[in-house]
Image (spheres, helix red, strand yellow):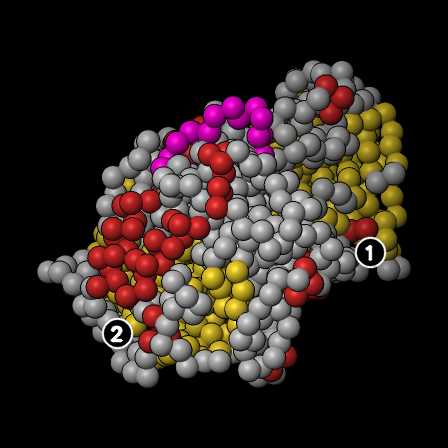
Amino acid sequence: MKKNVSRRDALKFVAAGVVSTGVVGCTKQSISTELTQQHSEHDFSSTPLPTKDKWHKTPDRTWLGGEYWANPMEDWQVKNGAAECSSIGGNRSIHSLTHQLKDVSKPFQMSVNIKRLTANKRDGGAGFRLGVKSELNEYRSNCFVQQGYDAGILGDRLILGAKETLLSSNLYNQTLSLELDATPQLGASLIILRAKVGEKVIAELSHLAAKEELIGNVALVSNFAIASVTHQNPPANLQGNRYRFSDWEIAGEAFEYKADRTFGTLLWTMYSLSDSRSSEGFVMKLSAYTGPIGKLDNQYVELQILKGKQWISIAKEKLNTDGWVATFRIPNWNEKQNHRYRAVYVQKYTDNTEEAHYWEGNIKANPSNRPLKMAALTCQNDYGYPYQPVADNVRKLDPDLVFFSGDQLYEQHGGFGIIREPANLAILNYLRKFYQFAWAFREVMRNCPTICLPDDHDVLQGNLWGEGGAPMQNIEKDLSASVLSGYIEPVRVVNTVHRTSTAHHPDPFDPSPTNGISAYYSDMVYGDVGFAILADRQWKSGPDRINVEVGVTGEGEDPLLIRPEYDPEGLELLGKRQEAFLTQWSKDWRGHTLKAVLSQTVFAGISTHQPRPDRYLKYDFDSSGWPASARNRAIDCMRPSMALHICGDTHLGTLSQYGVSKQRDSNWAFCTPAIAAGWPRWWLPDEVGLPHTNRPSHGIEQTGEYLDSFGNKIYVYAVGNPEVGKSGNRYVKAHEKGSGFGFITFDTSALTYTLSAYKFLVDVSDGRASNQFEGWPVTIHQKENRGENILS
């Protein structure tokens, strides 16, 4: 590219088709000719080629393409060759993922065609947004910022930053072209914006903009002058017009260009590998995810493995059109060696051209006859997005297995609120939030077996007492779904959450649905360790059965008072089906020497204060310490297995040991720190006068043998109490709030578990003791999980 690229030059490059990003896939293909998406995160071209969208040849669909992030996804679609916003709400945007303004001492250009589709009197405008950045100025986190330097049309005016001028013609039902040219001027950038209808210029503005106003993401915005709202239907004063965008062109050396930042159409994969202990040997299951595509798009994903220098096709699966996931199940997998794999999706365009998209990774050999390393993560609130310190540290530790115990998303993720119905839009609303999780951790998951459990926020509820799949009643009394029992989302939506989270898990023990909702509890044998995978919310009884007010009951009550009336007969935690499964699994030692139970949360009420360190809240019915008798039954089922219980959810890292008949007679539980803790909790029993005995030999405060508020016996060995998060930097704030992750090493020869609890903003490779929360690391012996205790 020349040092200064004119818009005409840019158009010539685009027309010549020099920006092709894929090749047609085939069953066998030489490795030397393949295109992969494995690029260094720090590699970029200093002279990016001009690029243009492909909407003109893309079939009608929701997904705009891997080069873009749409806010919110469910409000955008490719329709008749353009990107069209279906909402009249404010601040709907399309971010370029591959181009970020980096060096405005060099020129840049953009152009786009815009058509106003409605004629509301109040207009929110449409056009470009430059300089969109978070405090990190990281391209993914930038996508969720709703402000920047706007350049476009607003009503009958042309807008450029704080400047404006009248348009010389009415725009309704006409296509307008916006052309933006920027040239460097003594450390700033001279921006010229033109509005044209055909070849006629109907308005022009210029503005000298400072560097700080421009660096960051660039985006197209519909209704940039109207604030977004976090509910489905904006009020009349926050309604604008609908807009349509086409032929978005980007050029210039001011842009940093990174082709590897595309996200889709093939998004990511998750897989598992398990010894079936049957004629099927080891079974490998893999789910491949695309964005929501259209009826005329290719509906199949192909799975290939590398043999020598050739890619060999081993399976082809149709996408499920709710979750846009294709799941492969391959029995008799050769578990003794690593296998390079790739998922292949061939994008077919309306001009009869094709483009192959690949997602490549490694299916690891079964880690037998050596220690198994597992990363355990939970609760990713998006104020800390994209959680890069955690993602980087997990990759550095190179786990054999990754476990996400729930809350891969929260209702507020990405802004724009929740859609409860109709189901098709509710699914898109869910998927958009779920994709944020994948976008942050897909590099970890591509090369490592992954267990991913849905929890309450994954099904878009503040709390979940599933009652065996019962629908929530009197929804109007609990719009946040935080108090009442049952599921607020339609069955179709809940099953989509289950499918997208768990379809790649080993086959369910009993897949029979309850009230139409699928069951996913199962077991896995991998690396000489047996895992029970549970759903500890799905059958749980709700507190409305005992006439309490969640979040209020217990205020001002004596901390030492135990109420037996809160534990009547007939209440469930795991439910009878899972109790029977856990009992059977505890006795089955085929193919492994250690066991672990994986579930959403800890079977004890290990928190005293929330959401402030000075607010004592006695009862947390969201914990699996309630119902107490059902909790004890679950532990009785689990004790013979001598399994370590690994879980999350509480936003408070703890290491504890359960007691049923007496203190410390049962399994240990590692509740891992949250990836990015939202609602904070503290365990401060000493401050409210809860008596304790047998404080561990390390002498750390707030530890020892206690009764929780439901009367459960617990031995708390370590706790990662947070500070109050105050920093304006998301990563520092996450660190303050006690965020981080867990790591477990299973030594199947020594029959031990070594547990680590890492803080958020550390570098695990430097080996500092301060990288972990006080009290960790800890080594537990297998027999301690049935009360034969060594640790003191």
Residue 165 location (% of width, % of height) = 87, 29
Which residue has dot 1 on it? 211
Residue drawn at the location 61% of the way across and 27% of the way down? 232
Q: Horizontally, is 272 left or right of 589 in the view?
A: right
Q: Quadrant of the N terminus?
A: bottom right
Residue drawn at the location 25% of the way across and 39% of the way down? 512
Disc 1 to disc 2: CB gap under 8 Å: no
Type of the residue with mark 1: Lys
Camera-nearest residue between 452 and 250? 452
**Which quadrant would residue 372 be assigned to in this image?**
bottom left
Q: Is residue 257 magenta?
A: no
Camera-nearest residue between 364 and 584? 584
Which span of residues is magenta-colored?
A: 468-480
Which residue has dot 2 on it? 593
Is 75 situated above or below 568?
Answer: above
First of labels 1, 2 by sequence position: 1
- Badge count: 2
